[in-house]
Amino acid sequence: MPRIKVRRVAEAVPDIPSILPPDGRQSDASLAIRRGVSRRLRANGYAVTAELALPTGRRADVAALSKTGEIVIVEVKSSIEDFRADNKWPDYLPFADLFYFATGPHVPADIFPDDAGLIVADPYGAEILREAELAKIAAATRKQMLIRMARAAMDQLYGLDDPEARRHSE
């Protein structure tokens, strides 16, 4: 299968500074993909947050909210092994109107399920190769997710204003 090409693909994953401290769970490749996905979603008018805790205790790599209230979850997979070792992604479906996998240009697209959206990204941006199918979530779940997203964003902003607060809350 030919490699998928994305505009301005980085040959090597550069050091990506962030004002949010890394939590140590993600590889540099995953962080690069996440950044490109987040940039694409923001360019499409979505508000974006990373590592959103779901009601099940799982964490969504990227969660986004459209201007009309649609919730998007993106699961980042940085390698074939990463995808094959992780079978928890169906647990995210009840919490998203749209669900995507995101990967780098070095990962073959045909390993991902056809019934999920697919994004290929590098640190600078992303291309949507396959749109996700809209599956509206229940109203009560939407309310729960909106509250989680708002609280996560508020906590991130407060952590920037008072970096020591993070240590006091752990």
Image (tube, grey):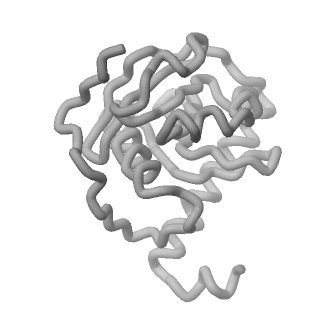
Q: In the image shown, does 43 or 112 lie closer to the viewer?
A: 112
Q: In the image shown, does 91 or 41 lie closer to the viewer?
A: 91
For residue 57, above or below residue 65: below
The image quadrant where one finds the C terminus is bottom right
Q: In the image shown, does 81 or 40 lie closer to the viewer?
A: 81
- The residue located at (67%, 38%) in the rendering is 85
For residue 16, above or below residue 114: below
For residue 146, above or below residue 67: below
- The residue located at (34%, 42%) in the rendering is 36
Residue furthest toward the left?
Answer: 8
The image quadrant where one finds the N terminus is top left
x, y (%) of residue 23?
56, 67
- The residue located at (17%, 38%) in the rendering is 8
x, y (%) of residue 17?
32, 67
Would you identify the image quadrant in which residue 152 lies?
A: bottom right
- The residue located at (42%, 57%) in the rendering is 28
For residue 91, above or below residue 98: below
Label tally: 0
x, y (%) of residue 70?
56, 28
Report the side of 91 relative to 111 (left or right). Answer: right
x, y (%) of residue 151?
64, 58
Q: In the image shown, does 168 or 70 lie closer to the viewer?
A: 168
Report the side of 36 relative to 147 (left or right). Answer: left
